Amino acid sequence: MRIGINTRFLLSTKMEGFGWYTFEIAKRLVLNHPEHEFVFFFDRAYDEKYIFAKNVTPIVLSPPARHPLLFIYWFEFALKKALKKQKIDVFFSPDGYLSLRSNVPQIGVIHDINFEHFPKDIPFTPRIYLRHYFPKFAQKATKIITVSEASKIDIATTYKIDADKIRVAWNGASEYFKPIDDETKHAIRNFYSNGKPYFLFVGAIHPRKNVKRLIEAFIQFKKASQSDIQLVIVGESLWKNNSLNISISDEISSQIHFTGHLPIEELAKVMGSAFALTYVPYFEGFGIPLLEAMQCGVPIISGNKTSLPEVAGDAALYCDPFNIEDIAEKMNEISTSDSLREKLKKNGLERSKLFSWDKAAEIVWEEISTITSNN
């Protein structure tokens, strides 16, 4: 069997959400099924470390697809032609983008459809593309994989698709994320937060991630308490025109630290050294930082919308992400209760055992096998 995989997001310079998902799933598919051939479709020069075994053939299709107009050409012309030439039996796309003009069976991973519910969070051009094409991708897909029951219900309802066409495969988290020793915590806090304990946010600085309200809640928390806890924000702006536009005093500003993108090895140390993860998006398909925190034994303050309660379960203290006062109150509650923090740590370490990339890859393979056996 020849399996094509969209590997556009395997980027050696900066791996983020889609990239890590592609890496974790594609690597397991290749290594677990050496009897099959895999064709990786890149849109630029690739790093050899992503060619996981001898049963992988890498192909670069031009042009680099990072703009909606180039998406159309890459998927509808370059990829369509390549799928036929390479005699691909099934095409797997970890970012959900498919070729509408190809007759090859296709599996798309639609992580969430936030752009359907909060379109103004996204710049005009990508918004138009996503809202026009993703309903078509959902219809075109032979099978859809998504990452939570919340997303499954949303996709089926919004796009009027039979729920049986959609399979849920929870995400996993890297093995880098695990409890760390006090010496490492001390070093990390000295470097990132003036030697003080810190609340942590990890994710793109994007409107739906709710960083603006998180910072405003932190300001309220600091004004109402004598706590020395600081705030560390790991991530970069997803859209260049994004701005938080928050007025912050110099005193509190010095206690809010933006790190930008961090390599995963460093991120795992920063996560494991956090006083608590404060993760309060108002829309999320899964929320991998929740799982990373659970694996590290870090307590969580989480938003109570969409998939987040499904993922965090009893390992989080929940708040209304639209209510700044509620977020601030939960910061105060978790900062003043040792017993609560210990309970959340214990629950998180236990709950994290429910999730793994191995399980997710097994589900993907089951769907690939089912499609190829029916064709």
Image: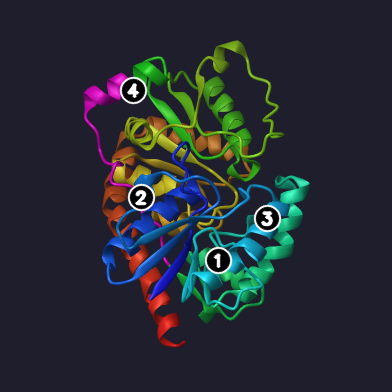
The residue positioned 56% from the left and 70% from the top of the image is: 153
**Residue farthest to the top, as pictured:** 250
x, y (%) of residue 333? 44, 35
Nearer to us of marks 1 and 3 is 1
Q: Earlier in the sequence, mark 3 or mark 4?
A: 3
Magenta span dominant secondary structure: loop
The answer for how far apart the CA atoms under marks 3 and 4 are is: 36 Å
The reply to whether discs 1 and 3 touch (Cβ–Cβ < 8 Å) is: no
The answer for how far apart the CA atoms under marks 4 and 2 are is: 21 Å
Provide the residue designation for mark 1: 82
Left or right, residue 205 beside residue 225: right
Residue 188, disc:
4
Provide the residue designation for mark 2: 173
Residue 115, disc:
3
Q: Secondary structure at mark 4?
A: helix
Camera-nearest residue between 274 and 133: 133
